[in-house]
Image (spheres, rainbow, N blue to C red):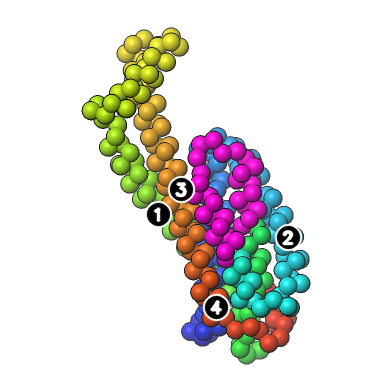
Amino acid sequence: MLFSRQFGSCFLVMLATGAILIATTQFVPQLLQEYYGYTATWAGLALSPGGMATVVMMALVGRLTGTVPAKWLIIAGAVVIAAAMYNLTNIYGDLNFGWFVWQRVYVGVGLPLIFLSITSASYEGIPKNKTDQASALINVARNTGGSIGVSIAQNVLAYRQQFHQSRLVENVVPSNPAYQETLQQMTQAFQERGSSALDAANQAFAAIGQAVAEQAAYLAYIDVFYALCLMALTAVPLALLIREPKGPAPAGAH
């Protein structure tokens, strides 16, 4: 079945969708806790409205599947998710809670467009005695895709964070006037808070190092979300290969 045009395309789309779903579920709260100072509770709450958006969209998409071709719903969902991932590449230190909530809501809107459409399209051309096997493979695609997505995102994050930090520290050198000026200003600020000249200089140096590390992390997360954006867009050409189901999905589909 995996080598058939219809089911193989559905399987690959579900792989990409599972990758994005699980990767964002892990990395958005991780970002909020590590670099925005959120507690685990508030980081989790940032995802909750996306779940409610998914529930609402499930009911709406269920009505659309009978009138709109599955491939166009999949393309619409992939574009919405890709747009959300691309929007997440605009992260910086002053973003608020609501901004992250809306990004998750956009993902919650896009996911049902793909999930329900894949459910109906994946059974096209599958013999009735193999529908249980097809259902199991689609679930495997979602779960395996989630594992692949987390692995890819984690590797991108680690590698690109090292890369960006190595590039940023090239400017943190005594010969750089901007660095010297910043160091002097921060040293003076720490002295005004009561630190000795030596302690203030060490604190200023440490603060600059922390700022460089945080900026490298933001840039690495941007690369992660950009990679997920590209992954979502891969569903578009795959969806164009999908034929429209001639009838409703088998009763065993889930």
Please state which amino acid type lies under the numbered disc 2: Val
Residue position marked by numbered label 1 in the rendering: 155
Q: Nearer the viewer, residue 180 or 247?
A: 180
Please state which amino acid type lies under the numbered disc 3: Tyr
Q: Residue furthest left?
A: 175
The Cα–Cα distance between marks 3 and 2, rounded to whole angstroms, is 28 Å
Disc 3 or 1, which lies upstream in sequence? 1
218 sits left or right of 133 in the view: left
Disc 1 or 2, which lies upstream in sequence? 2
Q: Is residue 86 magenta?
A: yes
- The mark found on residue 55 in the picture is 2
Bounds of the magenta segment: 78-107
Residue position marked by numbered label 3 in the rendering: 221
Q: Residue 60: where, in percent of width, then height? A: 75, 66
Asked which quadrant contains residue 136, the reply is bottom right
In front of the other: label 1 or label 4?
4
Please state which amino acid type lies under the numbered disc 4: Leu
Identify the element where label 4 is drawn: loop
